[in-house]
Image (cartoon, rainbow, N blue to C red):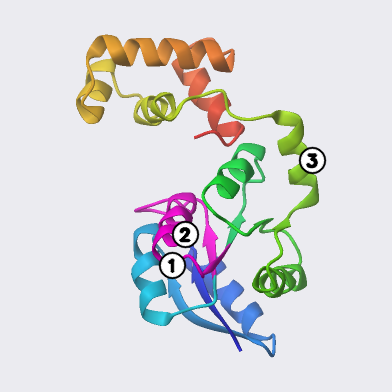
Amino acid sequence: MIRVLLAEDQAMVREALAALLSLEDDLDVVAQVSRGDEVLEAARSAEPDVALLDIEMPGRTGLDAAAELRDALPGLKVVILTTFGRPGYLRRAMESGADAFLVKDAPAAELADAVRRVLRGERVIDPALAAAALADGASPLTERERDVLRAAADGASNAEVAQALHLSHGTVRNYLSTAIQKTGARNRADAVRIARDKGWL
């Protein structure tokens, strides 16, 4: 049996995925969590072969959880499942050590097949998303610019961003200005929107 950990914050979606996977003769959902910061502990406890991670979760994103799993449990295979088929997310998922990247509207049989394929050492990527990621190119933003945009995303002032990230006001202003320029945005709210749409945040 292939042991599966499922991390998804929406209970109905998580339960539906668990039910669908359990219909497969060779798959067994051994753990379910609703937060990204619960993934590593659940993986250590349940010892799954494959972790299915949603991207958008409270506590920690699926991308961050994937990187954490790669460092702590390098033998564990990771499949990123997302509603958001954004090229930037795919690129970041691969950088964080994910073995597969699928959108949630894919057929259930495709998900079960992806679980089996990653255990055989294959990489499984939604073909349309792979093509879009190649066409879109890498994120032009540095990690620090992404941090500042994330901190400013909910309308925080430069002073609040500076305090949250332990930076000077001038440094925050410079990072925001550079991020606006790199994304071709009109202002910082527009830069946040563009970066989110492309999956860079």
Looking at the rendered structure, the secondary structure element under dot 3 is: helix
- Is residue 91 rendered magenta in the image? no
What residue is drawn where x is 49% and y is 63%? 8
Q: Residues within 10 Å of mark 3 (few under 14, many from 20)?
A: few
- The residue wearing badge 2 is 70
Amino acid at circle 2: Arg
- The residue wearing badge 3 is 131
- The residue wearing badge 1 is 73
Which quadrant of the view contains residue 19? Answer: bottom right
Amino acid at circle 3: Ala
Front residue of 14 and 3: 3
Q: Are marks 2 and 1 in contact (CB under 8 Å)?
A: yes
Left or right of 16 in this view: 106: right
* Residue 89 picture location, percent across and down: 59, 42
Front: mark 2 or 3: 2
Q: Quadrant of the N terminus?
A: bottom right
What residue is drawn where x is 71% and y is 68%? 114
Amino acid at circle 1: Leu
* Residue 77 picture location, percent across and down: 56, 67
Query: In the image, which disc is placed on residue 121?
Result: none
Q: Which residues are magenta?
A: 51-78
Q: Are marks 2 and 3 in contact (CB under 8 Å)?
A: no
Which quadrant of the view contains residue 156? Answer: top left
Front: mark 3 or 1: 1
Q: Residues within 10 Å of mark 1 (few under 14, many from 20)?
A: some
* Residue 47 picture location, percent across and down: 44, 80
